[in-house]
Every structure is written in structure tokens, then in C-alpha cells.
């Protein structure tokens, strides 16, 4: 099993959610977050300077079976992309076990 943690633009959340549902990832948790990035200069829009580090982000936490990893990452990469600084990050880590409390199932059965 894998855990995918991704930070995306809040404005791309609906696109990412739809893309995840299309690859049969139907459960994940998310939070609204604000962070500081590598951007050193601000952008000017209509005469107002703003920092891309202060753009609202959404943090998604997704636990999936190993066979879903490639299609899940691809769905996020394609749906969250704008081509501009601040599109986000994806982190993948190993999960050793998972349990469904209601049925006491574990492993892949615990998350599917």
C-alpha cells in the first residue's frame, strides 16, 4: 500500500477530485492549507503585487493499493497542472498496514 500526500492549488481541487474519481480513487481526506514556497519574487496583476507563496492550497491525503499508484499520480499530475510556479507537490510513501475499524479487515481489504 502507498500513501500519496499532495499539495495543489485550491482552484484545481475540483479538477483533481474528478480525475481521482475517474481512476476509481473514491476516498481521500483533504485540508485547506497555506505554505511558504521557493518563489522569491511576486507577480503583478492589475497593478497589485502578490506572492505566489500565499496562494491558498489544498492538501490531500490518499491511501491506495500498490496497483493504483501509477494511475493516481498521473491523474493528479495532469489535472493539477497549470504550468505556473506554485502548481504543487506530490509525495509518495510506503504504508505497512491499514485497518477498517468497523469490520476489522486489514491490508488492502481495509482500504477498499
Image (cartoon, rainbow, N blue to C red):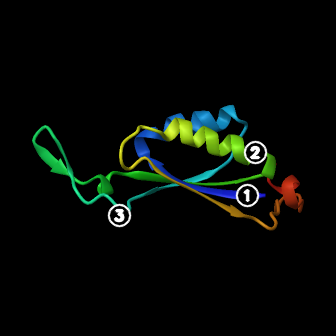
Along the horizontal axis of the image, is 42 left or right of 10? left
Which secondary structure lies at badge 3? loop
Residue 77 in the image: x percent, y percent? Answer: 55, 42
Q: Which residue occupies 75% across, 45% down?
A: 68
Residue 6 in the image: x percent, y percent? Answer: 55, 54
Q: Which residue occupies 52% across, 34% down?
A: 15
State whether residue 26 appears in this view: no
Along the horizontal axis of the image, is 99 left or right of 54? right
Which secondary structure lies at badge 2? helix
The total of numbered circles placed on residues is 3
Query: Which one is in front, 81 or 8?
Result: 81
Residue carrying label 3? 36
Query: Which one is in front, 24 or 78?
Result: 78
Question: Of label 2 and label 1, which has the lower sequence position?
Answer: 1
Residue carrying label 1? 2
Which secondary structure lies at badge 1? strand
State whether residue 74 appears in this view: yes
Q: Which residue occupies 57% across, 39% down?
A: 17
Other-residue count near label 1 (Cα within 10 Å), few / some / many at <14 / 14–19 / ≥20: some
What separation in Å lies between label 3 and label 2 (alpha carbons)? 30 Å
Question: Of label 1 and label 3, which has the lower sequence position?
Answer: 1
Residue carrying label 2? 68
Q: Which residue occupies 88% across, 53% down?
A: 109
Residue furthest left as drawn: 47
Other-residue count near label 2 (Cα within 10 Å), few / some / many at <14 / 14–19 / ≥20: some
Amino acid at each position: 500500500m502507498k500513501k500519496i500526500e499532495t499539495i495543489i492549488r485550491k482552484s484545481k481541487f475540483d479538477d483533481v477530485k474528478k480525475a481521482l474519481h475517474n481512476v476509481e480513487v473514491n476516498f481521500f481526506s483533504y485540508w485547506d492549507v497555506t505554505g511558504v514556497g521557493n518563489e522569491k519574487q511576486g507577480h503583478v496583476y492589475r497593478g497589485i503585487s502578490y506572492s505566489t507563496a500565499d496562494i491558498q492550497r489544498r492538501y490531500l491525503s490518499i491511501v491506495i493499493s500498490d496497483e493504483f499508484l501509477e494511475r493516481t499520480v498521473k491523474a493528479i499530475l495532469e489535472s493539477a497542472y497549470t504550468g505556473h510556479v506554485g502548481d504543487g507537490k506530490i509525495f509518495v510513501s510506503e504504508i505497512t498496514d491499514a485497518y477498517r475499524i468497523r469490520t476489522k479487515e486489514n491490508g488492502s481489504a481495509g482500504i477498499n
